[in-house]
Structure formats: structure tokens, C-alpha cells
Amino acid sequence: MNTYKAKIKITLRKGILDVQGKAVEQALHSMDYDIMENVRIGKYVELDITAQNDGQAEEFVREACDKIIANPIVEDYEIEILEQA
Amino acid sequence: MKFGVVVFPGSNCDHDALYATANNVDAESVEIWHKDTQIPSDVSCIILPGGFSFGDYLRCGSIASFSPIMKEVIEFANNGGYVIGICNGFQILTESGLLPGTLLKNESLNFVCKDVHLKVESSNCIYTKELEAGTVLRIPVAHGEGNYYADEETINSLETNNQIIFRYSDSEGNISKEANPNGAINNIAGICNKNGNVLGMMPHPERYSDEILGCNDGVGIFNSILKNIKN
């Protein structure tokens, strides 16, 4: 068995209004950062997992994302699996 | 009949729900701890109360939906048992898959705590059977994530099947953007499942069930449950 670190990036689906992102964008514009737009705010989750290989680790993490870590109705996620030294 | 109010760590409307069902209507009420693994056999309606279960960590209602009692609540509901989720309870119902859709952050980003008007859209479930469709109730809301969202197909199916039970309205029952406190699609404040035995609503009827508060419009919902559940 090996230990891996899973890095999970969760974002609101395209098309879902991101009210936090909108508020931050307005703040940026009020600071004269007109060059910045389309602010989207998400979540970042890190966890350690023991599995036979990286494929199995990703499979378990994906399962956990679908069940609890992300809300598939409105969120997308990306998983990165790194082998622990 | 007996109501069972589930208490999660962070629930804060459990006692209001217990009080309303035991004192404002002619029923009994009992607490059920979230770690319990059995629903008392004499309970015929479960209430998932408002609050901030598990601190609203990760997403509102997400961690509570995996509490041991929820396995029983899901089975109870799937066997036709009556379950009402209020505010955080509604969020727990969507997270556990008993109701479709989800509750997003309020469009204004503000926590909204005020009285709103609700138009009863359907009397097809036991929760509103004693209230005529079109009736307007004054009920308080108190939430930061009450912006009901579901994809177009789900919304269409909710509309077609008369599963939208309450909509935010003005005091005359007019549905408008101004009357919508959180940006919910189609002013949706409460929905039920297809079978009509599971209801989720953001406003708090238990907080307006006692006459002494100056408004007891909420008690109509509990009375309706009481009258229509056969013991």
C-alpha cells in the first residue's frame, strides 16, 4: 500500500451565478483593476489517502467527491493525486 | 399523533419545533438525537429543524445528511413516512437526495432575517391540505443560503407535478422579484417530493406558531399535518 496526497479543486459550474465572485469583481473594479473580470470563487481540499496505486486512490477520491466533498448539482471538481515521499 | 424532532449538533430551532408541535397544536413531540439509529415506532412525522448543523462546514446540511439517524429518516421517507425539513432541515433534505435541487448563497450575499409572505401554491400534500391554495401566510426567514436552484428540467417537473408548495409573494399573494428575499428560482420557498410526503421549506413556521408572538400563521401547517395523518 502507498500513501498519496489528493488535491481537490472545487468550482461552481459554468452558468451558475457566483455571487461571491461578483462581489469581489466589483471590489476589484472599485480599486481600478478594470483589467480583471469573470471572478469565480471555489474551494480547495487536500487529504492523504492510502491505496494500492494512484489509479485506485483517484477512484476513491472521486467517489468521495460525488458523495460528500462536492455537490454535483452545482459544482465541478478536479483531482490531482501525488505520491508521498 | 407524535412528532419527532431530530437534534443535530448546531441545530437551534429544535426547541421551537418541539414547543410548536407540543403546545400550539394538539400533538405530542419528542427529541431524536442525530446519533440514534432508530426512529421511535409511535412517531408519524419527522421534523428536521433549522440551525447550523455541524457549523455549516463544507456546505449547509452536507455533514448532517450523513448522521446515523439520516439512514433511518431516508428509509422512513422512502416508505411513505412524513418528513418536514425547515431551513437547515431543507438543506439536509436536498443534500441527502430526498428532495431535488440545492440551496445556494443568497443573491444579495446577506444573511436575511425578516418576515416574508408566502403564497400557498398547492393543497395537494398533507402539509397544506387545510390551507386553501392562494392563502398568504406571514412567516419569518433567517438564512444565508436559501437561494433555491435546480436545473431547468427539474424546475419544469416540479412545476408540472405541483410540487412547489410555497412561493415568496407580497401580502396580496403577488409573486414578484421584490418579494423574493434570496434570489430563489421562480420565488420557490418550499417544495415537496413527488409522493407529497417530504416537504422542505426555508421559512420558519415553528417561529410563528404561538399567538403570544403576534402572528401564528405557521401553526396552520402543523394543524394540517395533525388533521391528515392517520394514527
Image (tube, coloured by chain):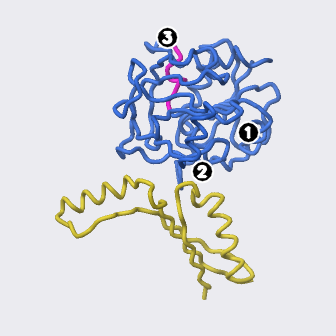
The residue wearing badge 2 is: B62
**Amino acid, disc 1:** Val
**Amino acid, disc 2:** Ser
Q: Which residues are magenta?
A: B203-211
Instruction: Judge whether residue B85 can be spotted in this image.
Output: no
Residue name at image x 39 percent, y 36 percent? B112
Label 1 to label 3: alpha-carbon separation: 31 Å
Q: Secondary structure at mark 2?
A: loop
Instruction: Please identify the quarter of the rendering in which residue B69 is found.
Output: top right
Have a look at marks 1 and 3 and say if they share a chain.
yes
Instruction: Please identify the quarter of the rendering in which residue B93 is found.
Output: top right
- The chain coloured blue is B
Instruction: Judge whether residue B84 can be spotted in this image.
Output: yes
Give the label, 1 or 3, closer to the camera: 1
Tell me: residue A52, above or below residue B198: below
The residue wearing badge 3 is: B211
Q: Earlier in the sequence, mark 1 or mark 3?
A: 1
Tell me: residue B113, above or below residue B3: below
The subunit letter for the residue under badge 2 reads B
**In the rendered image of this protein, which colour is used for chain A?**
yellow
